[in-house]
Image (cartoon, grey):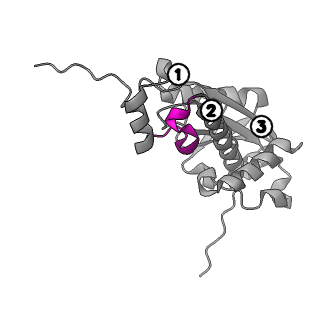
């Protein structure tokens, strides 16, 4: 028995039928790393694509983690260059993450990405975002279920990867171009050898100071 193909416009289509035409997918990249910003992106795709299908340039669009770097770059170029697509990208840097915590910083970046688009509804990857300023539908693994979220995931991932390559030039001893700030063995060894740099998240283990033991 052939599996039914996934309709990755299912959630957008339901909202478009309610005459809510500005439906934004929103996603983030970089919640887990020890260094660098968290980046959020929001994307509004044209409703007519639900009937005509995606442009050939977006064939295979999916969760950015399921794509190669080359595929992400191609999709990024088309999404940001297509006049029918509206998008915005925002970030929260390591200092803000340390100040208000990673969850709140992520949600602030999401709101900042959504604000200029003025969407009527947002499709959010993951769990509901209590502080989101627009009506929302939260979709677990939404970047594989919604083209709007998938497009946002590509923009967030590519933007953050580019930022981390730029930081590699500034702080080459940490290898940010390779691991993008995640806690790999190479990264942990560099932290042990050189300490933290300007873009490290000081509230993240193993960078967070250990509380003194009481005897």
Residue 169 badge:
2
Residue 85 is labelled as none
* Residue 26 appears in the picture as rendered: no
Q: Indicate yes or no whether the magenta region holds residue 180.
A: yes
Q: Nearer the viewer, residue 170 or 108?
A: 170
Residue in view at x 47 percent, y 24 percent:
101
Label 1 sits on residue: 198
Instruction: Choose the circle earlier in sequence order: 2 or 3.
Output: 3
Front-lying residue, 80 or 168:
168
> Could you tell me which secondary element the residue under label 3 belongs to?
strand
Residue 111 counted in the magenta span:
no
Q: Is residue 195 above or below residue 69?
A: above
- Residue 114 at x, y percent in the picture: 71, 31
Mark 3 Cα shell of 10 Å, populated few (<14), some (14-19), many (≥20): many
- Between the C-alphas of marks 3 and 1, the distance is 29 Å
Q: Residue furthest right?
A: 83
Q: Which residues are magenta?
A: 171-184
Is residue 165 something one can see in this rendering?
Answer: yes
- Residue 160 or residue 12, whichever sits in front: 160
From the image, tell me which residue sits under label 3. Answer: 87
- The residue shown at (61%, 28%) is 170
Q: Quadrant of the N terminus?
A: bottom right
């Amino acid at each position: 028995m052939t599996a039914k193909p996934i309709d990755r416009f299912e959630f957008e289509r339901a909202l478009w039928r309610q005459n809510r035409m500005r439906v934004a997918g929103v996603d983030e990249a970089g919640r887990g790393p020890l260094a660098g910003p968290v980046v959020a992106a929001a994307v509004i795709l044209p409703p007519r694509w639900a009937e005509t299908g995606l442009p050939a340039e977006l064939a295979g669009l999916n969760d950015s983690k399921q794509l190669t770097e080359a595929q992400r770059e191609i999709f990024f170029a088309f999404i940001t260059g297509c006049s029918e697509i509206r998008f915005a990208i925002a970030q929260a840097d390591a200092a803000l993450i340390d100040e208000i915590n990673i969850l709140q910083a992520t949600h602030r970046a999401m709101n900042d990405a959504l604000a200029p688009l003025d969407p009527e509804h947002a499709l959010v990857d993951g769990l509901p975002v209590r502080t989101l300023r627009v009506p929302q539908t939260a979709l677990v693994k939404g970047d594989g279920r919604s083209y709007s979220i998938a497009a946002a995931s590509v923009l967030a991932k590519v933007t953050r990867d580019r930022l981390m390559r730029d930081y590699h030039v500034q702080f080459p001893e940490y290898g940010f171009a390779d691991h993008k700030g995640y806690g790999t063995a190479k990264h942990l060894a560099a932290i042990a050898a050189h300490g933290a740099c300007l873009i490290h998240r000081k509230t993240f283990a193993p960078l967070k100071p250990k509380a003194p033991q009481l005897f």
